Amino acid sequence: GVDWENSVRQSGLSRSKGKRVLVTGAAGFVGTHVSIALKRRGDGVVGIDNFNSYYDPSLKRARNDLLRREGIFVVEGDINNAPLLRKLFELVKFTHVMHLAAQAGVRYAMKNPASYVHSNIAGLVNVLEVCKSANPQPSIVWASSSSVYGLNSKVPFSEKDRTDQPASLYAATKKAGEEIAHTYNHIYGLSITGLRFFTVYGPWGRPDMAYFFFTKDILKGKKITIFEGPNHKSVARDFTYIDDIVKGCLGALDTAGKSTGSGGKKKGAAQLRVFNLGNTSPVQVSKLVSILEKLLKVKAKKQVLAMPRNGDVLFTHANISYAQSEFGYKPTTDLQTGLKKFVKWYMEYYSSSKGKKSAW
Ligand code: NAD
């Protein structure tokens, strides 16, 4: 109780001249990078994360150590805990909420569907409920996902394309989140911006994602599986480097609030926006593997299998012109360059004492 309250009080947020941002999922991959970027440019940041064990919690603890060194405090708690969130809003008049906490991962949704409902639906509603009654009301920027495009066969995906064919429960909960955002904007006048991230990768990334466990398995000499669709086309992703995603998050945050009157919306009305944040340059997974082989200087043992119906889609490809026009979003890191930075981090982290202790 009192300990974390004091830590929040001492984090200097009330004195911060910039924005005061609550980052949910702050010990997560994207949350860590976004929190550091906000803090370094002078905004006040407090995080919340439940440090769950969906993937190696010691990696989340290590990210938290990094955050602490940057002067960022992360409250340990669940976004479904309404009294805890309300207490946080009593301690700090947050101007913005960067809502990144979620149950991520497409395939795991078949194993633990309830965790997706808990974090991505109930959790989102709880965050919005608390924001709705906060005074002042904060502007909200939250992570949706490229997975909402589902089985859409039109590429590149643009924000106006159909999102009514989710291929996984994960995708369905993100799509539901977008509908819930609409309701809270409509009834309570909350300003809400959804960001559809496209396969984010980089240092401090998620061990459940292919580029990460391919690296691990290639180094171990373990066989990796590449999935392909009809016509022997390997699955392709619009891999987007974390620094580009961070710039997109900050751009969305900095333009969040009341409508400027563009796009036909009444000036001063609470915004409801959704943006693709991708790289606009999809790469086949077979190519990802060959880049990793070169960077690691190890030949991968591969098997190629037909893609099962496990929630994954064949390809993703973002049209980013909307984010470009609204806040100048422009990714600059290609997959080769970004993976080089990831591999460098991976080697350093897993040879350090902290990394060696990792459970997986
Ligand atoms: P992550 O799993 O590393 O981060 C999410 C964090 O939220 C974790 O640290 C987790 O402990 C925390 N969390 C989960 N449920 C919680 C709860 N109920 N209460 C409190 N904390 C909770 O994932 P990430 O890759 O950093 O993703 C961030 C956001 O972006 C998520 O909403 C995710 O769905 C979305 N997204 C990510 C990608 C990607 O490629 N990384 C792509 C599309 C969308």
Image (cartoon, rainbow, N blue to C red):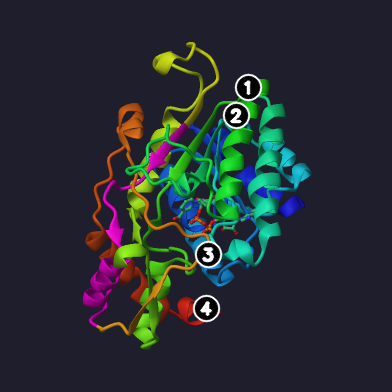
Q: Secondary structure at mark 1?
A: helix
Q: CA distance from mark 2 to mark 3?
A: 29 Å
Q: Secondary structure at mark 2?
A: helix
Query: Which is more foreground, mark 2 or mark 3?
Result: 3
Query: Which is more foreground, mark 1 or mark 4?
Result: 1
Tell me the kind of residue under disc 1.
Answer: His
Residue 358 numbered mark, or none:
4
Residue segment shown in magenta:
274-297
Query: Which is more foreground, mark 3 or mark 1?
Result: 3
Residue 186 numbered mark, or none:
1
Image location (x, y in percent) of residue 191: 56, 26
Q: CA distance from mark 1 to mark 4?
A: 45 Å
Whether residues under marks 2 and 1 lie with C-beta atoms below 8 angstroms apart, the answer is yes
Residue at point 52%, 23% (across, down): 271
Q: CA distance from mark 3 to mark 1?
A: 35 Å
Image location (x, y in percent) of residue 360: 53, 79
**Image-quadrant location for residue 263:** top left
Q: CA distance from mark 3 to mark 4?
A: 28 Å
Give the image quadrant in which the ligand numbered 1 is located.
Answer: bottom right
Residue 285 left/right relative to 40: left
Residue at point 51%, 13% (across, down): 268
Tell me the kind of residue under disc 4.
Answer: Ser
Q: Earlier in the sequence, mark 4 or mark 2?
A: 2
Dot 3 alpha-carbon crowd within 10 angstroms: few under 14, some 14 to 19, many 20 or more: few
Tell me the kind of residue under disc 2.
Answer: His
Q: Earlier in the sequence, mark 3 or mark 1?
A: 1
- The residue under label 2 is 182
Q: Secondary structure at mark 4?
A: loop
- The residue under label 3 is 310
Residue at point 58%, 69% (across, down): 57
